[in-house]
Amino acid sequence: MTKTPRPGTPVRGSRSGVPVMALFDLLGRSWALGILWILHDQGPCTFRELRQHCEMMSPTVLNTRLRELRESELIDHGADGYRVTALGAELYQHLAPMKQWAVRWARHLHTSD
C-alpha cells in the first residue's frame, strides 16, 4: 500500500517533502485530479457514480485515491456520498485556470503541426 503524500515527509521529487511537491505527488497519481474535478463539478457522488464518471476504473484504484484524498482533507464522505471539502474547493479554484490554459496550449500545438 502506498502512503498518502504529506508535506514534511519524503515524496516523489523531494526528500524533504516540500509542500508543493507533496501536492504534486498526490495530484499526479492516476485519477486524483479527475476525482476532484468530478466531485466539484457534479456535486456529491456515490462510489458507483464515481466509477461511472471515471470510465469504470478498477475499484481498487478508486478506493486508494478516495482514501488518499480523504486523508489529505480534500474530499470527505457523508450520507449523500463523496464530496469536495472547503479546502478541496479552494484547491480547485487555483487549478481551474489551468483548464483554460490547456485549451490554448492544445490549439497552439495543433496549429504548429
Image (cartoon, rainbow, N blue to C red):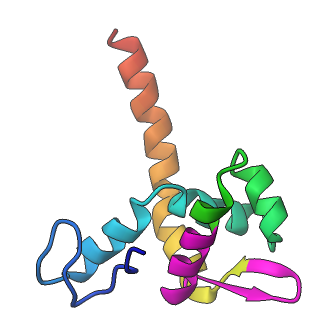
Image quadrant where residue 59 sits: bottom right
The answer to whether residue 5 is above or below residue 92 is: below
Q: Where is residue 87 in the image (x, y as percent from the top left)?
A: 54, 86
Q: Where is residue 26 in the image (x, y as percent from the top left)?
A: 40, 70
Q: Residue at x 75, y 61 (%)?
A: 50
Q: In which quarter of the image is residue 76?
A: bottom right
Give the x, y percent position of residue 6. Answer: 33, 86
Please state the total of marks drawn on the protein image. 0
Whether residue 57 is visible here, answered yes or no, is: yes
Q: In this picture, is 50 found above or below 10?
A: above
Furthest toward the right, the residue is 80
| Magenta stretch holds residue 69 | yes
* Apparent side of residue 104 relative to residue 23 in the rendered image (left or right): right
Q: In this view, does 59 lie to the left or right of 2?
A: right
Q: Quadrant of the C terminus?
A: top left
Highlighted range, magenta: 63-82
Residue lying furthest left in this view? 15
Location of residue 51 by image quarter: bottom right
Does any portion of residue 90 appear in the rendered image?
A: no
Q: Residue at x 50, y 36 (%)?
A: 103
When the figure is inspected, residue 53 is found, relative to residue 76, above or below; the finding is: above
The spot of residue 42 in percent (x, y) is 79, 63
Quadrant of image for the N terminus:
bottom left
- Position of 36 compared to 55: left or right? left
Q: Residue furthest front?
A: 1
For residue 50, side relative to residue 111 (left or right): right
Residue at figure coordinates x 43%, y 44% from the top left: 101
Determine the residue located farthest toward the top in the rendered image: 113
Look at the image and say whether residue 75 sits in the magenta stretch: yes
